Amino acid sequence: MKKLIFMIIIVSIFFVVPNAMAYKEGDLELTLGGNGSSDEQFNGTVFNIEAGLGYFMSKNFETIWRQGISYADAPGSNNWNGSTRFSLDYHFDLSRLYPYLGANIGYLYGDTVEEQFIAGPEGGIKYFVNTKTFITCGVEYQFFFKNKDEADENYNDGRFVYILGIGFKF
């Protein structure tokens, strides 16, 4: 009997609960994430932060502005890098779960990178812990280019960027 009650609760949480988390046209969301590290004497400090502001053009399509910044305080030098990206994502409404697929384009800049454009596909999932707050994880594939010809040539020489953070719908 306990197993049956447990299964009913699980099914209710993921499939039967009315979807108060559903997006609608005009909704906004803010996402935040970051990480960092230092050695035992707090030398060699590195941190990364990522923020995004999204706008839902419909209940499934979202446009997003993302800003990433990284900073490294190494002995003898301090360096920072950044990336600014714009994305268009399609969301699949699965109650508390919102998988998404999309594409992004932007610019990479800073002290230790070659300044250039970046673009590529992206995907991930959002899990709502309540009607306004969610945990998000995703991956972007970014390839680098300075002009249209390089975009075709460099597609296979990109990098993966992983995102884990918290988000707020308002």
Image: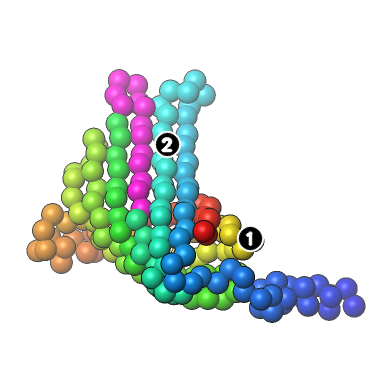
Residue 148 position in % (x across, y down): 11, 63
Residue found at the very far right of the displayed protein: 1
**Amino acid at the residue labelled 2:** Phe
Q: Give the range drawn in magenta.
A: 66-78
| Position above or below: 5 against 44 | below
Q: Magenta stretch: residue 68 in it? A: yes
Residue 133 left/right relative to 158? right
Residue 148 left/right relative to 20? left
According to the image, label 1 marks what residue? Answer: 129
Looking at the image, which residue is at 47% across and 65% down?
A: 27
Chosen colour scheme: rainbow
According to the image, label 2 marks what residue? Answer: 47
Q: Can residue 101 be seen in this view?
A: no
Residue depth check, mark 1 versus mark 2: number of the one nearer the observer: 1
Snapshot quadrant of residue 72: top left
Residue found at the very far front of the displayed protein: 26
| Position above or below: 59 against 158 | below
Numbered badge on residue 27:
none
Residue 101 position in % (x across, y down): 40, 71
Residue 86 left/right relative to 5? left
Looking at the image, which residue is at 58% across and 68% down?
A: 21
Snapshot quadrant of residue 117: bottom left
**Amino acid at the residue labelled 1:** Val
Looking at the image, which residue is at 41% across and 53% down?
A: 52
Snapshot quadrant of residue 13: bottom right
Q: What secondary structure is found at the residue carrying circle 1? A: loop
Q: Magenta stretch: residue 164 in it? A: no
